[in-house]
Image: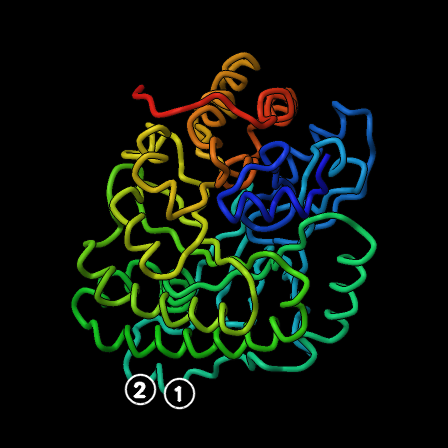
Amino acid sequence: MMTSRERFRLALEHKEADRVPIDVGGDMHNGVHDVAYRNLLEFLGERDEICYYDRIQHLAALKESVYERLHSDTRYLFANAPEGFEIRVEQDSSWHDEWGVKRINAGLYDEAVEAPLAECTMEKIKKYRIPDAADPSRFSGLREKAQNLYDTTDYAVIGGNAASLFYLPSEIVGYQEFMEKIALETKMMEALIDRILEWQIDFFGGYLDAIGEFIEMIWMGDDWGTQIAPLMSPGMFRDIFVKRYREFTAFVKKRANVKVALHSCGAVYWALEAFAEAGIDVVHPVQGDAEGLRDPYLLKKEFGNALVFYSNLRNQTVLPYGTVEEVERDVKLKIDALAPGGGYIMSGGHNIQADVPPENILAMIDTTLKYGAYPIKGGPKKL
């Protein structure tokens, strides 16, 4: 039987391990919403004081016994907040992040309500006080934590901080204004994106210097699809973002021997080839209910040699609202289609949301353990 680290590493190399690896509960892409976590704890007869590692999405830090029950092959490491910064929650539940974006609780999540560069101009972009990416306090003690986790456990250690070149500037400007101006005042928005790219390179330089030799993968996080179509024209995506993605991934891979995973919700079939060209190794969550992503056999046939796939579960329909049997069928289908030859990792397909019942969470895990052992007799088929 392989260790979690060996299993995960082989999947990243498009090779078969002893079983399909599982990643759940660890970061802002494969986390568990606090409501779903409370329900799971009750179902398992466990207790835990809820702590958050992602306030925006209300993601709970899992206790070790729950990680073990979910058979997660991964553990995550995050950089520290910079010295002198702390989140101050006001009486109306609002707070500001270090970029100056104001957020407020909207029920299950905290939503952005004010942008520091609203009514954006080139002058505002030039004067915008960007946080210090290379502040040493961000990385203080991180190397020791990474080495300890690497030396004392067999888990695949993953870099939890995610780079963004689309989501972050859209939050700083405000989503609607950003989308309008990237079309109508493209050079202005490119100037902001370039400042963010510079920040990401500076941050990940320090981050990878601290933990690069101990981790298997780092994340990027940008959403490129609606439920049925691209968020912007594929031509604009290529002209503005692909070359900058390529610059970032080349920097990361020169700095450390790691893979780069991209989280992008929505219908992104149109972008998969461009992701690979941009140096992306792994795509998540390959949303199984979105247009163009519903046939896992086709995905494997067309992109299985270039990209590692995470999940592809129907996380908008079957996982939250289906029966245990329907979850089992969806998991078995994705294993049969995507796992042969390696290059497949099981997860909930983005975070496990508040409406996913504990029975379905466990069905996802237990079905992976039962049917995800190699060799898997899958193959090219058509739904």
The quadrant in which the N terminus is found is: top right
- Three-letter amino acid code of the residue under disc 1: Lys
Q: Nearer the viewer, residue 89 or 238?
A: 238
Residue 347 in view of the camera? no
Q: Which residue is mark 1?
A: 127
Measuring 67% from the left and 68% from the top, which residue is drawn there? 211
| Residue 303 image offset from top left, x and y in percent | 34, 42
Measuring 48% from the left and 44% from the top, which residue is drawn there? 14
Name the mark on residue 98. Answer: none
> Would you say the residues marked 2 and 1 are in contact, meaning their CB atoms lie under 8 Å apart?
yes
Q: Residues within 10 Å of mark 2 (few under 14, many from 20)?
A: few
Q: Nearer the viewer, residue 300 or 176?
A: 300
Per the image, label 2 sits on a secondary structure element best described as: helix
The quadrant in which the C terminus is found is: top left
Q: Which residue is mark 2?
A: 123
Q: Is 329 placed left or right of 362 in the picture?
A: left
Per the image, label 1 sits on a secondary structure element best described as: helix
| Residue 83 image offset from top left, x and y in percent | 70, 78
Residue 301 in view of the camera? yes
Measuring 61% from the left and 59% from the top, which residue is drawn there? 159
Rendered image coloring scheme: rainbow
| Residue 268 image offset from top left, x and y in percent | 31, 44
Query: To which quarter of the image does residue 293 belong?
Result: top left
